């Protein structure tokens, strides 16, 4: 029996659409991949990071709907199962993060603690 490997994070249809829009912008470096990660700081201890970057040896590579993604292997324990969404409303515009591993989140939604 073959094991099915799931992606560490998921992107909603809105997030996929927005990322693909960014990737088709003039001057986009097609050698870069979408990096999902965390960094220290923020009001709750850790902050989500999302941007385009080059892959290195510490990364786990995966693909979502034709989007090449990378994540530092050490970040998976904080982010596994997280959903990234795109909000385009009057009060909130940008990427949002729903992380089942977060014990505490801040009001801005970009910072968390585990």
Image: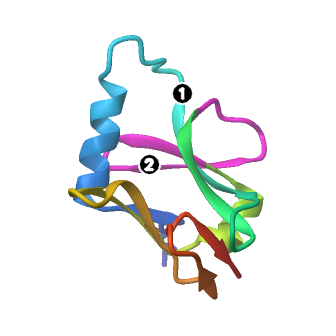
Measured as percent of width and height from the top left, residue 30 is found at: 45, 20
Verify whether residue 39 appears in magenta. no
Answer left or right for 36 relative to 57: left
Considering every residue shown, the one lying at the far bottom of the view is 103
Position of 55 relative to 8 (above/below): above
Residue at 63% across, 85% down: 104
Q: Earlier in the sequence, mark 1 or mark 2?
A: 1
Position of 70 relative to 100 (above/below): above
Q: Is residue 27 visible?
A: yes
Query: Which secondary structure is most common in the magenta stretch?
Result: strand
Measured as percent of width and height from the top left, residue 3 is found at: 52, 74
Mark nearest the camera among 1 and 2 is 1
Verify whether residue 58 appears in magenta. yes
Measured as percent of width and height from the top left, residue 33 is found at: 52, 35
**Splitting the image into 4 quarters, where does residue 78 fall?**
bottom right
**Splitting the image into 4 quarters, where does residue 87 fall?**
bottom left
Rendered image: mark on residue 112? none
**Splitting the image into 4 quarters, where does residue 10 fall?**
bottom left
Answer left or right for 91 relative to 94: left
Rendered image: mark on residue 63? 2
Q: Which residues are magenta?
A: 53-70
Q: Nearer the viewer, residue 34 or 85?
A: 85
Q: Nearer the viewer, residue 6 or 95?
A: 95
Q: Nearer the viewer, residue 100 or 7?
A: 100
Q: Which residue is mark 1?
A: 32
Q: Quadrant of the C terminus?
A: bottom right
Measured as percent of width and height from the top left, residue 29 is found at: 48, 17
- Circle 1 SS class: loop
Position of 93 relative to 77 (above/below): above
């Amino acid at each position: 029996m073959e094991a099915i490997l799931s992606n560490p994070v998921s992107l909603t249809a809105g997030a996929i659409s927005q990322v693909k829009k960014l990737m088709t912008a003039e001057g986009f470096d097609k050698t870069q991949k979408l990096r999902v990660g965390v960094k220290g700081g923020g009001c709750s201890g850790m902050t989500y990071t999302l941007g385009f970057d080059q892959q290195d040896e510490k990364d786990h590579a995966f693909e979502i709907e034709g989007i090449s993604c990378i994540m530092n292997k050490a970040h998976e324990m904080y982010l596994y199962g997280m959903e990234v969404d795109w909000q385009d409303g009057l009060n909130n515009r940008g990427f949002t993060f729903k992380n089942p591993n977060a014990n505490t989140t801040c009001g801005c939604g970009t910072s968390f603690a585990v």
